[in-house]
Image: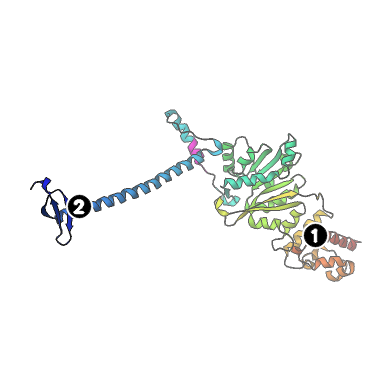
Amino acid sequence: MSYDEVIGDEIEDPVQNQVTTSTSGITKQLTRDPFLERTIEKINDFCYYLRQFIHQTTYFGCKITKFFVNTQIFLQNIWSIQKKVVILQPQKEKDNELWTIITRRMQQVRAKKFLGQHFLTDLSVAQKIAETTLKGQSDEVQSTTEKVRVLEIGPGMGVLTQFLLKNPNIQLTAIEIDRESVAYLREWYPELNLVEGDFLKLDLDQLFPEGEFNVIGNYPYNISSQIFFKVLDYKDRIPVCSGMIQKEVAERLASKPGNKAYGILSVLLQAYYDIEYLFTVHEHVFNPPPKVKSAVIRMTRNKRRRLDCDEALFKTIVKTAFNQRRKQMRNSLKSLVEREKTASLKEKSLITNERLEWFLTRRPEQLSVEEFVELTNLIENERNQDIL
């Protein structure tokens, strides 16, 4: 029987494992070949696994490709710092110059622990900090041709500096003590008026012979209090001081009477400045990350030009009182009140001034700036009476 004779409708017989074909009334049974079936089954399995392998390879290939694309974008962002984009050109004469530029871009300033350096890496945070220095001064600047003079303390690698330089209303001067940072800033920000030195030892009257200037910075944690004490010395020339400090210190500066954070800096700075706690900055946006959170504050000079008391004595009383903050001020301020007789301070105070006695039964964190001013006048009067 020829091949053409067996072509027809196929009927499977599951019992006999045979295929019956019929054509024109002629019936023929064909027995299946087991070896052929196993071969076809294995080929089918092989095709299935091959298809799965190709699928997985394509998936991971896409992931790997995406990784290299993101890496290339990251490197291009590094190479284009301050909008100085490096264009890769295949010409041989440009290879050496290109390599030099890339090498310099990749160099980083090492953060030095003894200087309290933690470099900010988040540009959005840096931009927000830069915007804090012109509070209430933008309208005044726009109405005149003069720019606001701003002194940046510790610019590091210029993450904050770049936004200050872009502001057309700011005339920027920066002071940096780290020689490595100074070299970096002079390389990439040649237009910056940069002073190499220690801010705490700097004669600000020589740097700014006349007029006002603002202060801003990502302040080193280990000297932030000393920086603010120096700002107080120039309070009549510094209308705005803003920047980032340790969160605990920021809370202390902005704290109100009655809080545990209320202390020496709170009283002395709030006597002359209105202090705003603006926002918190987390550790992961620094390199290296600090062990504590940071915060951004702004201090704006208030309308109080002078205190209604002896300012030197006021400062001494505040510092002496908070040196023993858990005790009543009768004990901590005992040495500041002159006495003629051997009577106790309590007896002397009750005789001369009941208001002074009321203050001396309080703890320092319970007194506002105005009450410290009143206390200073009472103690000064008490001392004067003893002299008389």
**Amino acid type, mark 1:** Phe
User: Is residue 102 a member of the stretch shown in magenta?
Assistant: yes
Pointer 1 or 2: first along the chain: 2
Colour convention: rainbow
| Picture coordinates of residue 5, whole percent (x, y) | 11, 47
Give the residue pinned by disc 1. Answer: 372
Of helix, strand and loop, which mostly describes the magenta segment? helix
Farthest front residue in view? 25
Q: Is 84 in front, or is 331? A: 84
Label tally = 2
Residue at image position (39%, 46%) is: 62
| Picture coordinates of residue 41, whole percent (x, y) | 21, 54
For the magenta stretch, what is the residue range?
101-108
Please tell me whether residue 12 is drawn above or below residue 125 in the rendered image. below
Identify the image quadrant of residue 93.
top left
Give the residue pinned by disc 2. Answer: 40
Q: Is 243 in front, or is 388? A: 243
| Picture coordinates of residue 221, whole percent (x, y) | 63, 53
Q: Is residue 248 shown to the viewer in this render?
A: yes
Farthest right residue in view? 388
| Picture coordinates of residue 172, whole percent (x, y) | 67, 39
